[in-house]
Image: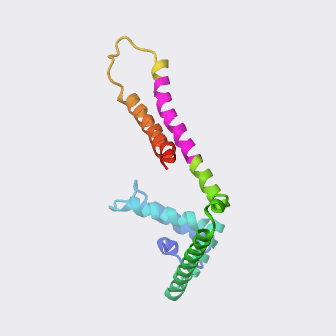
């Protein structure tokens, strides 16, 4: 974490007036129009960033609280262990649910909420991609039909029009093949 007090050359107990005074002095010192230092602009930006945080009462308090709450390596390790245990517990729950689904008759499983939800989401994605495919076909054609030809303009192949049409046809074919045809092949 950046030490904004150090950037302004102040202690953490500095008052708002001291922060403003230090900012004015350093901003004048590092302003690119005034300073001849090679890194004047970068230093000027750092001073302004520090001032932005320390001049506002709420930001300064939040910054101070964050500096006070540094996490020890033991606490970090403890948090990682808690997270790893949570992940393992979620994995165990998923396995238990899958085993319980495996024991249910297929007809009952098909009527379950999880199966119906997965089917609904699958259908939703199918229709979204179908609409995207149709839009990729219709929009370029519409733009061609509504475009006014300029006499001096040469007629060339419009790849920016042809490519979306080919892409849209690909979407529609993919939906047909992987969704509708795959279901009939079973």
Q: Which residues are magenta?
A: 124-142
Q: Which residue is pictured at 42% across the width and 64% down the height?
A: 43
Q: Who's the residue at 51% across and 33% down the image?
A: 134
The residue furthest top is 151
- Residue 74 sits inside the magenta stretch: no
Which residue is at the front of the view, 99 or 6? 99
Residue 45 percent location from the top left of the image: 45, 60
Residue 151 versus residue 88: which sits nearer the camera? 88
Against 114, is 171 above or below?
A: above
Q: Nearer the viewer, residue 151 or 62?
A: 151
Residue located at (40% from left, 53% from top): 33
Q: Quadrant of residue 65?
A: bottom right
Residue 112 lies, in percent from the top left, at 67, 61
Compared with 36, 94 (above or below) is below
- Image spot of residue 177 (x, y percent): 45, 42
Q: Is residue 32 left or right of residue 4?
A: left
Any part of residue 70 in sight? no
Q: Is residue 148 visible to the viewer in this orientation of the structure? A: yes
Whether 138 is among the magenta residues is yes
């Amino acid at each position: 974490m950046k030490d904004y007090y150090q950037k302004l050359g102040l202690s953490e107990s500095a008052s708002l007036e001291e922060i403003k005074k230090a900012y004015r002095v350093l901003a004048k010192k590092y302003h690119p129009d005034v300073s001849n230092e090679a890194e004047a602009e970068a230093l000027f930006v750092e001073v302004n960033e520090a001032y932005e945080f320390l001049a506002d009462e709420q930001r300064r308090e939040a910054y101070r609280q964050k500096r006070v709450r540094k996490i020890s390596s033991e606490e970090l390790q403890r948090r990682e262990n808690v997270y790893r245990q949570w992940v393992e517990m979620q994995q165990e729950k998923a396995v238990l649910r899958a085993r319980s689904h495996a024991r249910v008759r297929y007809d009952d499983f098909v009527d379950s909420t999880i199966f119906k939800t997965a089917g609904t989401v699958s259908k939703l994605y199918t229709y979204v991609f179908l609409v995207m495919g149709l839009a990729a076909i219709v929009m370029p054609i519409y733009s061609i039909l509504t475009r006014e030809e300029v006499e001096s303009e040469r007629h060339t192949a419009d790849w920016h029009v042809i490519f979306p049409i080919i892409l849209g046809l690909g979407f529609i074919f993919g939906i047909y093949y992987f969704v509708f045809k795959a279901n009939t092949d079973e």
